[in-house]
Image: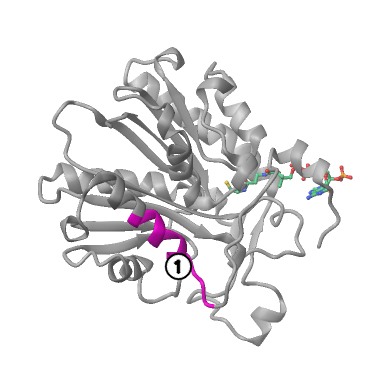
Amino acid sequence: MVDTSDEWIKTRTGIHERRILKGEGKGTSDMIVPAVNNLLNNSQVRPEEIDLVIVATITPDRMLPATAMHVVKRCRLINAFGFDINAACSGFLYGLETARRFVESGSYKNVIIIGADKMSSIIDYQDRNTCIIFGDGAGAALLQPSTNGLGIQDAILRADSSGVELLYQHAGGSAYPPNEETVANREHFVYQDGKQVFKAAVQGMSGVCQDILERNGLTGDDIDWLVPHQANIRIIDATRERMGLPREKTMINIHKYGNTTAGTLPLCLWGYKDQLKPGDRLLLTAFGGGFTYGAIILTWGC
Ligand SMILES: CC(C)(COP(=O)(O)OP(=O)(O)OC[C@H]1O[C@@H](n2cnc3c(N)ncnc32)[C@H](O)[C@@H]1OP(=O)(O)O)[C@@H](O)C(=O)NCCC(=O)NCCS
């Protein structure tokens, strides 16, 4: 499709495979529904016990209604309300912090947070700056009140609006609604200045990780697992090296899935869950369009 090679992609990004959701009329919720059903089965929580569902995505099934509503309907979460969050690759992180606050308020007991994107729906397969990187994926997590001191300990969420013109999808919103011209000009696809995004991602993620560690009187040695956004293996390595963390303590699945935007963090947690023990201290970090970024420290609960 583009002038590239398997060798270039593997060495410059660490990506070996990507998943693409295929099928007429299939949207992001088609990946979310099995993830949520699986989550409910594993946690033995009934659908009617879910209070809230938050979907972090930049690729909603439709602009209206929220993808969360499709999930409520299709997973029969009959007592839940829900909404979507658009924070690009930091969506799961922003959503996790939002979900935590709802649980901490004492009003809600079972909150599902989802990170999901069908990136193939907004990627230009004639643009080698983006099409080699992104894939489709979804993951879901359940948050409940903690009774044993485990769970989310601290969060720092940040934004750097210098990224507004460096990573975006030009048309399709209210400023440039879709028309023949926007389609002909390929303005519904993601554009990025890869080099600038790369630099900002390393600085942003390593900086906010240092800040959250310091604020909590911790060092890299106190972290059992770094859970970084999966954008490029070189970004992951640069971030963990700045914290003095080895690869063995870093969750990595970019070789299998590429960058699934809001999906990367929950897919990592799912992929590594059999290696996690209650009490393990995790440092989650992400960086994405906006720029949005942040870090969360949590101790694994179950
Ligand atoms: C996009 C990205 C993979 C490009 O890698 P890079 O190492 O920065 O590559 P550069 O842009 O410096 O280009 C290096 C060379 O490879 C070429 N090149 C770029 N993309 C290529 C591709 N897909 N295949 C082959 N060659 C490519 C360039 O033309 C350039 O050639 P030149 O030296 O002859 O001029 C990288 O910048 C990146 O991962 N950025 C962050 C993206 C990201 O994470 N976005 C999501 C938001 S979190």
Q: Residue furthest left?
A: 106
**Residue 138 screen position, x and y as percent:** 46, 54
Residue 29 belongs to the span the image colors magenta: yes
Q: Residue at x 71, y 80 (%)?
A: 184
Q: Quadrant of ligand 1?
A: top right
The amino acid on which the numbered mark 1 sits, given as a three-letter code, is: Pro
Residue at mark 1: 60
Q: Is residue 267 above or below residue 248?
A: below
Label 1 secondary element: loop
Snapshot colouring: one colour
Query: Which quarter shows the N terminus?
Result: bottom right
Q: Position of residue 8 (x, y in %)?
A: 81, 42
Q: Which residues are magenta?
A: 25-37
Depth check, front residue: 161 or 145: 145
| Residue 140 x %, y % | 37, 50
- Could you say which quadrant of the image residue 199 lies in? top right
Determine the main secondary structure of the stretch shown in magenta. helix
Residue at image point 29% right, 71% down: 73
